[in-house]
Amino acid sequence: MPDRAVADRTIEIPPDAWGRRSTVAPVMPWVFGLVILLLLVGRIVLTPVLTAPALQTWATVFVAICVQALPFLVFGVLLSAAITAFVPPSFWTRALPRHPYAAVPVAGAAGAVLPGCECASVPVASGLMARGVTPAAALAFLLSSPAINPVVVVATAVAFPQQPLMVVSRFCASLAVAVLVGWVWLRFGRSSWLRVPSRPPASGSAWAAFRDAMRHDLLHAGGFLVVGGLTAATLNVVVPRAWLGSVAGLPVLSVIVLGLLAVLLSICSEADAFVAASLTAFSPTAKLAFLVVGPMVDLKLIALQAGTFGRSFAIRFVPLTFLLGIAASIVVGEVLL
């Protein structure tokens, strides 16, 4: 019994290390102090930069592009996933003509039925290709859907209330470009240039396939939308607006400049008519080029198309679409406007 008491008292004796300073210097207090110092210095140094008008404009444009495009991108992803999960491949065999050259204009005209933005058309066209639709026909739908759908037609009529021919011109020129691009791709395009996207294999029910396809497309297309939005916002701030006024009086050059401006600004097709109507210094034909080119070729679309179909596709498809868009705008504008 005495031995146990002695042992207990021995255990209660504090260790030798108690009350002594550690030989290792404390790190966390210094790290915390460094972070506080960096925050204070950053607030003093970066506040003038972060509050600069150019940076605020850049942030506004970037957020506006993403917020404006995201709902339509989600709509396109939902529609693409629904096509993948619920529409059997045999439907497209019956709906589209068997001859590829006939399928292209039919698919282009189908763009007048489904409301959607250019961001929505990319995943939908991707889903059509994955279901066996001829790539040229899917590309015709990709170009026509954001340019001639009912929402865009109504928005254009509201933006140009005294120019009903602007609505007709936009519809005709956009559909002509979509069909011509489809035919050119069908004639000269190669399978190695186009990466046909694959869909995740069906796992169980159709609803499971719908969920998997939606998650795959949204994560894939959303990242490239952000990249395109960043680029468009940067160029929107960098390009001086004084350059635009100096070329407004030059017929052909003004058409090309507004076509390029549509590429840089990357405005949603449901809203671009109001921007075009505000460019009062430019001719109706130049405004038509802005309306035709924008929904087919802009920075966020280029990023989405390159990410979805591959860079080899984008470096051929984008210049072809732009050139045909400018040419169609000049021809239709001279005839109707």
Image (cartoon, helix red, strand yellow):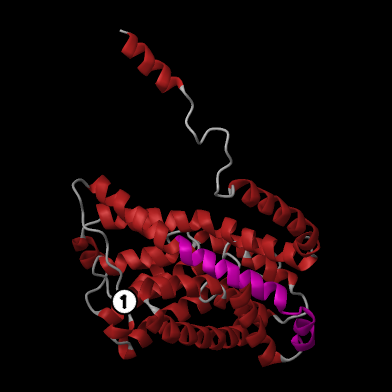
Q: Can residue 266 be seen in this view?
A: no
Who's the residue at 58% across and 55% down the image?
Answer: 67
15 is higher (above) or lower (below) than 312: above
Please name the predominant secondary structure of the magenta segment in the image.
Answer: helix
Which quadrant holds the C terminus? bottom right
| Residue under numbered circle 1 | 195
| Image quadrant assignment for residue 260 | bottom right
132 is higher (above) or lower (below) than 33: below
Type of amino acid under label 1: Arg
Taking depth in this image into account, of 45 and 161 the one nearest to the observer is: 45
The local secondary structure at tag 1 comes to: loop
Q: What stretch is highlighted in magenta?
A: 222-248
Residue 200 position, x and y percent, is: 25, 59
Who's the residue at 68% across and 73% down the image?
Answer: 236
Q: Is residue 233 left or right of residue 76?
A: right
| Image quadrant assignment for residue 37 | bottom right
Residue 34 position, x and y percent, is: 67, 54
51 is higher (above) or lower (below) than 7: below
Residue 72 position, x and y percent, is: 49, 57
| The stretch drawn in magenta includes residue 244 | yes
